[in-house]
Image (spheres, rainbow, N blue to C red):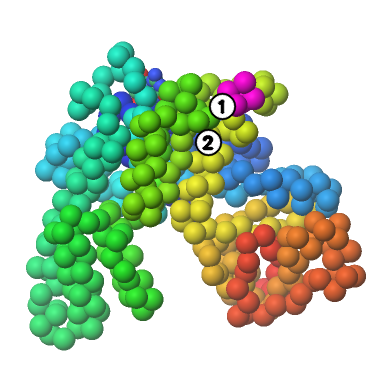
Amino acid sequence: GFKVGIVGLPNVGKSTLFNALTRTAAAQAANFPFCTIEPNVGDVAVPDARLDRLAAIAGSKQIIPTRMTFVDIAGLVKGASKGEGLGNQFLANIRETDAIAHVLRCFEDGDVTHVEGRVNPVEDAEVIETELMIADMESIEKRLQGLSRKVRGGDKDAIQQERLMRGALAALNDGRPARTVEVADEDRRAWSMLQLLTAKPILYVCNVDERSAASGNDFSAAVADMAAAQGAAYVVISAQIEEEIAQLPADEAAEFLEEMGLEEPGLDRLIQAGYELLALETYFTVGPKEARAWTIPHGTSAPRAAGVIHGDFERGFIRAETIAYDDFVGLGGEQAAKEAGKMRAEGKSYVVKDGDVMHFLFNT
Ligand code: GDP
């Protein structure tokens, strides 16, 4: 599955947010009970209204959303790259994630100590980013040394790696995170194998006070400017409120949201933003037994997409029968779509599109 690491300075609301994420009814959706893999790893359902519509049309008995993993990575402080706090272990945990949700304190509260003694989310973001940049520089320098013999020996992969590392190092020395480096298509794979912390896509999460949950505040506005300048994503959320909402029954939660002037839980926006950040898409399988959502990266071929369900589907792939979401819903279901000529037979080279309703035919 896809993993988003929640990072931030101490006391910014990471644990509160993580608890909210993993306590929602959606996270604990039937059939896939919320499982704590480790105390700080949570599996959450990706909210998608399309899945409910498909299930209603097909009369599916069960609805099974697709899921995403969040990891609460505590312990990042100034000096983490030098082994301060629980430094290195946490950097290793971040390395294993696909994207970073960076929680920033955008609320004032005299009772909650700020490690830097003042509320300034933009500077906080720089503190963490600096630690991650230093960690990247150190790991690159170490690895460059290890590569030098192979490079002299003319090893093609080593030469490619060295070139990419030098490009990243130049950006880092210039004060820019590795995600600002332009990477050619043919280098994508080798680049992601470098597992640079600052190359991971980033989403800033502004944790605001209760009153600012709907509108944001001056702090979150400053973060919005920073995110825009970096081409990064951001969401405004009140972790404390989300934690309260997550524990309410659905009808009370809806009432509470309305009082707060919110259209949907901030968590839904956060999960969706994480999904978009990772360029993930969803396809559906729909039948009387169940309607289910599956996650694929943008640009996935039909056999690969089938492999998400089961390896045998990919190995024995023959073809896929596909109905676009709009056709399925607009025409009122599979049979009607088929009669209208909207069910397509697609082969191995078909690239699955977001919202496709799929049937796979395969040899066993
Ligand atoms: P972490 O160290 O980043 O995991 O932070 P925690 O989630 O443990 O939160 C630190 C403290 O800040 C706790 O006492 C929380 O109750 C409090 N806190 C978290 N979010 C908010 C918020 O939105 N408003 C206020 N006033 N306090 C919050």
> What residue is shown with label 2?
267
Give neighbour class at mark 1: few <14, some 14-19, many 20+ (Cα, 10 Å): many
Residue 156 placement: quadrant? bottom left
Q: Residue at x 22, y 48 (%)?
A: 132
Q: Residue at x 64, y 25 (%)?
A: 258
> What residue is shown with label 1?
246
58 sits left or right of 122 in the view: right
User: Which three-letter amino acid code belongs to the residue tagged 2?
Assistant: Leu
Residue 257 in magenta stretch: yes
Q: Which mark is residue 114?
A: none
114 sits left or right of 340 in the view: left
Badge 1 element: helix
Residue 194 lies, in percent from the top left, at: 27, 64
- Looking at the image, do the residues carrying marks 1 and 2 touch, with CB atoms under 8 Å apart? yes
* Viewer-closest of 283 and 316: 283
Residue 299 lies, in percent from the top left, at: 54, 70
Marks 1, 2: nearer the viewer: 2
Q: Residue furthest top?
A: 111
Q: Look at the image and give the residue range highlighted in magenta.
A: 256-261
